[in-house]
Image (cartoon, grey):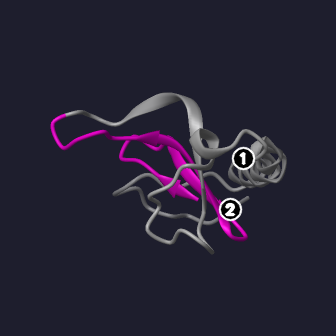
């Protein structure tokens, strides 16, 4: 999982797939959420040039395992909260 400066989820890699939730179109354009997540098959497109949703519409199944990974992370972060930059770590209770 990749997170942005404000802590929001940017992308998730699951097996050979990468799903991007937030991205920047250009340097002068701040990162923002797209209307629909971008999906790439990294095994055949490691450069992320061909977004699967625009090529074919049968890739929505990949969101099920990706969202399961996000749910696991959120449960873990609830139990073991992330430490903010500069914050002292005093251990988990």
- Label whose residue precedes the other's in the sequence (2 or 1): 1
Location of mark 1 (residue): 74
Tell me if 7 is positioned left or right of 19 in this view: left
Please report the bounds of the magenta region as a residue range.
1-28
Q: Quadrant of residue 23?
A: top left
Circle 1 Cα neighbour tier, 10 Å, few/some/many (<14 / 14–19 / ≥20): few
Any magenta on residue 17?
A: yes
- Label 2, label 1: how far apart the Cα atoms are: 16 Å
Tell me if 13 is positioned left or right of 60 in this view: left
Q: Quadrant of the N terminus?
A: bottom right
Contact, mark 2 vs mark 1 (Cβ under 8 Å): no
Q: Of all residues shown, which one is farthest toward the front?
A: 55
Q: Of all residues shown, which one is farthest toward the top?
A: 35
Tell me if 14 is positioned left or right of 7 in this view: right
- Give the vertical position of 63 relative to 36 (above or below): below
Q: Quadrant of the C terminus?
A: bottom right
Residue at image location 53% in from the left, 68% down from the top: 45
User: 78 or 53, which is in the foreground?
Assistant: 53
Circle 2 Cα neighbour tier, 10 Å, few/some/many (<14 / 14–19 / ≥20): few
Any magenta on residue 11?
A: yes
Residue at image location 55% in from the left, 64% down from the top: 90
Location of mark 2 (residue): 92
Position in image of residue 31 (x %, y %): 34, 37
In the picture, the disc for residue 85 is none
Position in image of residue 54 (x %, y %): 57, 40
């Amino acid at each position: 999982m990749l997170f942005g400066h404000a802590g929001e989820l940017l992308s998730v890699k699951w097996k050979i797939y990468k799903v991007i939730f937030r991205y920047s179109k250009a340097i002068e354009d701040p990162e923002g959420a797209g209307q629909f997540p971008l999906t790439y098959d990294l095994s055949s497109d490691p450069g992320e040039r061909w977004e699967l949703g625009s090529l074919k519409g049968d890739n929505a199944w990949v969101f099920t395992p990706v969202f399961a990974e996000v749910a696991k992370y959120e449960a873990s972060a609830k139990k073991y909260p992330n430490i903010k930059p500069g914050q002292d770590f005093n251990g988990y209770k």
